[in-house]
Amino acid sequence: MATDRTRRRTWTIGASVSVILVVLYLSGGVVSGLRSAANFVTSPFTWSVNEIARPIGHMFAGAINYSDVVGQNQKLRYELGRAELRANQQTALTRQLSELTTQLNVPFVGNLPTVAAQVSAVSPTNFAATVDISKGRDDGILVGMPVVADGGLVGVVTATTPGGATVRLISDVKSLIGVTFGDGKTSLVVSGQGVNDGLGATSVPLTSAIRTGTVLSTNGLDGGLFPPGLPVASVSKVSLTPGAATYNLSLQPLADLRNLLYLDVVLWEPST
């Protein structure tokens, strides 16, 4: 009986294998069938990998595109910054040219040669008033030369180096300037009163036809520190002390001593 059972099992297995082989043959062969079976088994995994890989790919592509956008934005910001810098530089140059043109408008020097210089430092106190300029001995500037700006006389050179100089302003308490007005027959001495007090003159004869608004200019006397005709100040107040035989004058400098950016040094010496 065991032999019959074994025989039947063998026959059943053989029949089943035969059926499977026939099916595989009809569907394209054993290899193709195996491939189909493998595809059937692995297709869910392939779908899952694709579904996972697709957003990851998109993510990397987005990251690369985002990096490109960031780089382009940085380049645009750089170009915009350069354009703004050029615009600011142009504005600064235009303003500087305007200031230079204004402050170096000194037709009153006539044919006297001048050297333009920029103010590099300002050192005013209530009594001493000086500025440093960007030109010196190498440019022909010597101690004693007058310095002017738009409006009139600014001061005199008191010290030099090869590349710079110091100018004592006319408002300095050590400053003394010989001036005249009108027909030039009367000469006065204008003295500095300190940075905050302007200029003054004393001992003005009562016979002088001087009044508020009168302009005083350097007299250019022989041996004087300045050539003739440089505007210095205008009269802001005429004072008369009762019983005195002379006037006292309060004067306003014609050059703006508080906002000096550029100056002209007049290449003139008293002996010339």
Image (cartoon, rainbow, N blue to C red):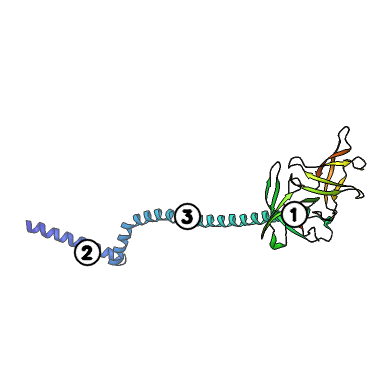
* 3 vs 2, front mark: 3
Quarter holding the C terminus is: bottom right
Residue 181 % position (x, y): 89, 48
* Mark 2 secondary-structure assignment: helix
Would residue 168 appear left or right of 237 to someone viewing this image?
left
Looking at the rendering, which quadrant does residue 101 occupy?
A: bottom right
Q: In this view, does 36 lie to the left or right of 182?
A: left
Give how far across and how far down residue 58 sits, in percent: 46, 55
* Amino acid found under the numbered disc labelled 1: Leu
- Badge 2 crowding class, 10 Å Cα cut-off, few under 14, some 14 to 19, many 20 or more, is few
Query: Which quadrant holds residue 8?
Result: bottom left
Q: Which residue is drawn at 30% across and 60% down?
A: 38
Identify residue for label 2. Answer: 18
Query: Would you say 19 lies left or right of 122 here?
Result: left
Q: Which of marks 2 and 1 is in front?
A: 1
For this rendering, which residue is in front, 45 or 197? 197
Read off the residue under disc 1. Answer: 263
Along the polypeptide, which appears first: circle 2 or circle 1? Answer: 2
Instruction: Give the mark nearer the N terminus: 3 vs 2.
Output: 2
Q: Could you say which is closer to the camera, residue 18 or residue 47?
A: 47
Circle nearer the viewer, 1 or 3: 1
Count residues near mark 1 (Cα–Cα under 10 Å), then give few for <14, some for 14-19, many for 20+.
Answer: many
Q: Point out residue 61 in the picture as x, y percentages from the top left corner.
A: 47, 57
Q: Residue at coordinates 84% horizontally, 44% vertically from top-left?
A: 234
Would you name the residue on which mark 3 appears?
63
Q: How far apart are marks 2 and 1 (CA)?
A: 116 Å
Residue 255 visible, this orientation: no
Q: What residue type is labelled 3?
A: Ala
